[in-house]
Image (cartoon, helix red, strand yellow):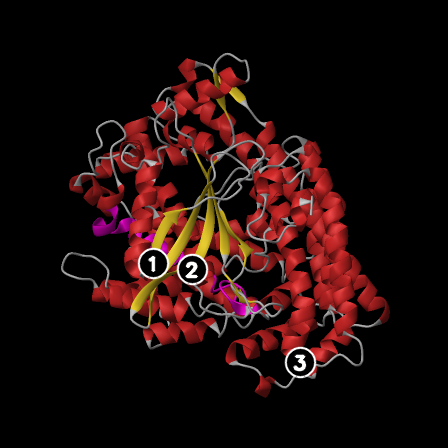
């Protein structure tokens, strides 16, 4: 038990895990899982759900949890030693899961299970399992099966390399700016840049491609040459246009080629078709039509957005021919003029502790739970840990029960991949080995700026929205009442519905009744003035046409890449074609955004990026129910919150997402609420 990765008594021992623990732990857990697989596939072993779960699922769950710890640390605390250990075990772990998912003996056991003997949760999990065996190659034989397994291993390896290149290319860039170059840049960003340069023993101000540094420079720096320098570095990361040792071009081609070959081995025309088997959308054509329809509706608004910026840039900023590195700056200045406020002004009111308290208050009120600080081993001193509890009536007395727990890792730092995400540590599960109810645990990870000079971190309103978004994913994982692991929480939820709870939570960031409780000026402690909020609200749909087209550009490129594109060909012409069709702002020829598009090349969204827009339709329509039932004070109805919690969050993946939606709304979703919310009705 001296290996922390083999300790399953409670929470992971993140602070004790060292690179040298990885290989022995994985070898041990893989051996256990292998033995369990052999046991349940013996001819005499009963084809019964509970019996298989008791032996096999308990072994594979341990493997998954332990590997999850290693993968998580690889994403948030990357070191050369840990990366080497991760990459050493990755092929072995991938090989096991591929073999498990394609084992025809195990597939036969599952096919022999009579669904009539299962409860509804188990029936859904069984249905998913049968589907996953087919997608996992269980019906392949001989050379085809061997090739399928080799493809899985290679995909894992190349996907990891893609991630490493994106992270390393981002971390490798630093520009030490002079004070004179930083005109217009917010003071807290300047201070953080000065501190970062001093930490490196350098003069000047260290600017990086991490969002808390990069984005404020693009929005506020008056020095056009500085913006161009940062923009070029950012859009050429991990490409042939940047430092070529991080170039992802070959990795992208190989990933696409492997996916196409996998799909064809399984009998699909392309990977897009394969990807949609487990989603709500029925065909690539349906997705493409949905995206093009939405693009057509958004385009007039986007064209007006650009026309307004061009006029403003020429008249007020002396920029007659705006370039790609000018648009964020022009947009910010136009917003300031039109709505008489700046993001920088707003940011002073969103101190991280106050925002977190406000988020917790809305969760506690709406979903009838309590959130309290908790203690657990963590991987970085800035990580916080919390527990969610609920009061239950047992007989005559009230008891407090643990619902779930979560880690919050808010700050950007070197060795941590960019973006924000929620991941599971363990799922809710009525364990078949000992009958114990295992409570769910989640990670909520963001990349916000840290506080400077002893002040709390300041969040932009976009940061606040990001925090609410990830908490929505976390709530679906943690508030589930499903006891079957494979369909509890986010497990088993169709990928294009998984963003519903996250995007739903974003809406509260625009409600005065919610927002006023989560602001306090960093200097005075005064809450956000109503007048400033009204300006923010007026600006809410500022450039929503442009924002919508940007997401559609990514989603359409993703789907066409996995359906119509020949992997042997260069993918850049396809991106250019999609931009020509969809975008109203064309980036320069050197732009290489695909080379860091981790969502589709290393993050599970392949032929699925459209999910964000698809689920936005669901989330906007779901939120409309709260708008329809809000009280006179503007506060959301607790009854509606309860209904939403029970229909959507608690049911997890135990039934098709459309059934959960209809259980909440009483009807199919419509596009109306989304277009209205985005000012495009």
Q: Name the residue that disc number 1 marks.
A: 369
Q: Are marks 1 and 2 in contact (CB under 8 Å)?
A: yes
Label 2 vs label 3: CA separation? Answer: 29 Å
Q: Name the residue that disc number 2 marks.
A: 403
Where is residue 212? Give x, y as percent.
44, 33
- Considering every residue shown, the one lying at the far front of the view is 396
Image vertical order of residue 336 relative to residue 640, above or below = above
Part of the protein shown in magenta: 486-515
263 vs 479, nearest the viewer: 479
Q: Examine the image and state in which quarter residue 453 appears.
A: top left
200 vs 113, nearest the viewer: 113
Disc 2 secondary structure class: strand
Tally the numbered discs. Answer: 3
Disc 3 secondary structure class: loop
Label 1 vs label 3: CA separation? Answer: 37 Å
Where is residue 288? Give x, y as percent.
51, 64
- Residue 412 is labelled as none
Question: Seen in the image, is 14 located left or right of residue 535?
Answer: right
Where is residue 177? Give x, y as percent.
48, 17
Q: Name the residue that disc number 3 marks.
A: 48
Question: Seen in the image, is 167 located left or right of residue 480?
Answer: right
Q: Residues within 10 Å of mark 3 (few under 14, many from 20)?
A: some
Q: Earlier in the sequence, mark 2 or mark 3?
A: 3
- Considering every residue shown, the one lying at the far top of the view is 203
Residue at position x 29%, y 59% from top? 366
Where is residue 313? Give x, y as percent.
33, 32
Image vertical order of residue 433 relative to residue 43, above or below = above
Q: Examine the image and state in which quarter residue 351 appears.
A: top left
Residue at position x 24%, y 47% from top? 537
């Amino acid at each position: 038990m001296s290996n922390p990765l083999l300790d399953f008594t409670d929470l992971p021992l993140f602070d004790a895990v060292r690179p040298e623990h990885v290989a022995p732990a994985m070898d041990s857990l893989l051996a256990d899982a292998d033995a369990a697989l052999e046991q349940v596939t013996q001819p005499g072993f009963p084809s019964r759900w509970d019996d298989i779960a008791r032996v096999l699922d308990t072994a594979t769950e341990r493997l998954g949890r332990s590997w999850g710890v290693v993968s998580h640390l690889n994403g948030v605390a990357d070191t050369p030693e840990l990366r080497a250990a991760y990459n050493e075990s990755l092929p072995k772990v991938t090989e096991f899961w591929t073999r498990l998912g394609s084992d025809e003996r195990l597939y036969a056991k599952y096919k022999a299970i009579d669904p009539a003997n299962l409860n509804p949760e188990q029936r859904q999990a069984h249905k998913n399992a049968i589907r996953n065996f087919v997608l996992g190659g269980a019906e392949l034989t001989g050379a085809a099966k061997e090739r399928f397994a080799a493809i899985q291993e290679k995909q894992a390896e190349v996907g990891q390399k893609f991630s490493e290149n994106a992270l390393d290319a981002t971390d490798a860039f630093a520009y030490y700016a002079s004070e004179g170059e930083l005109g217009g840049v917010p003071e807290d960003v300047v201070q953080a840049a000065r501190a970062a340069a001093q930490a490196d023993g350098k003069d000047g101000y260290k600017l990086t491609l991490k969002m808390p540094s990069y984005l404020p420079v693009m929005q506020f720096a008056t020095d056009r040459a500085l913006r161009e320098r940062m923009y070029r570095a950012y859009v050429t990361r991990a490409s042939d246009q940047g430092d070529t040792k991080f170039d992802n071009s070959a990795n992208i081609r190989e990933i696409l080629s492997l996916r196409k070959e996998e799909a064809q081995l399984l009998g699909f025309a392309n990977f897009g078709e394969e990807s949609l088997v487990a989603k709500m959308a029925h065909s690539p054509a349906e997705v493409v039509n949905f995206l093009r329809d939405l693009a057509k509706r958004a385009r007039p608004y986007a064209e007006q957005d650009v026309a307004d910026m061009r006029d403003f840039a020429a008249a007020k900023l002396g920029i007659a021919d705006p370039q790609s590195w000018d648009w964020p700056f022009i947009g910010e200045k136009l917003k300031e003029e039109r709505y008489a406020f700046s993001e920088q002004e707003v940011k002073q009111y969103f101190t991280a502790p106050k925002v977190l308290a406000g988020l917790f208050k809305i969760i506690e009120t709406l979903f009838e739970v309590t959130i309290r600080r908790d203690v657990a081993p963590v991987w970085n001193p800035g990580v916080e840990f919390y527990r969610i509890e609920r009061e239950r009536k047992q007989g005559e007395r009230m008891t407090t029960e643990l619902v779930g727990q979560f880690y919050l890792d808010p700050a950007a730092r070197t060795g941590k991949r960019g973006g924000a995400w929620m991941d599971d540590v363990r799922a809710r599960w009525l364990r078949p080995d000992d009958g114990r109810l295992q409570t769910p645990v989640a990670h909520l990870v963001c990349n916000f700026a840290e506080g400077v000079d002893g002040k709390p971190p300041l969040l932009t309103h976009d940061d606040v929205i990001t925090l609410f978004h990830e908490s929505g994913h976390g709530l679906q994982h943690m508030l589930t009442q499903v006891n079957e692991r494979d369909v509890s929480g986010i497990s088993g939820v169709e990928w294009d519905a998984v963003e519903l709870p996250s995007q739903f939570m974003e809406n509260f960031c625009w409600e005065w009744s919610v927002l006023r409780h989560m602001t306090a000026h960093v200097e005075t402690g005064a809450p956000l003035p109503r007048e400033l909020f009204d300006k923010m609200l007026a600006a809410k749909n500022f450039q929503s046409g442009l924002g919508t087209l940007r997401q559609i550009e990514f989603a359409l490129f993703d789907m066409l890449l996995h359906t119509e594109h020949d992997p042997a060909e260069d993918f850049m012409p396809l991106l250019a074609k999609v931009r020509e069709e969809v975008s109203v702002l064309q980036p320069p020829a050197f732009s290489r955004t695909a080379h860091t598009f981790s969502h589709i090349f290393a993050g599970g969204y392949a032929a699925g990026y459209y999910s964000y827009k698809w689920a936005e339709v669901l989330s906007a329509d779901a939120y409309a129910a709260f708008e329809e039932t809000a009280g006179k004070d503007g506060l959301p109805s607790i009854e509606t919150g309860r209904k939403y919690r029970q229909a959507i969050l608690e049911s997890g993946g135990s039934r098709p997402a459309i059934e959960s939606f209809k259980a909440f709304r009483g009807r199919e979703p419509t596009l109306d609420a989304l277009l209205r919310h985005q000012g495009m009705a």
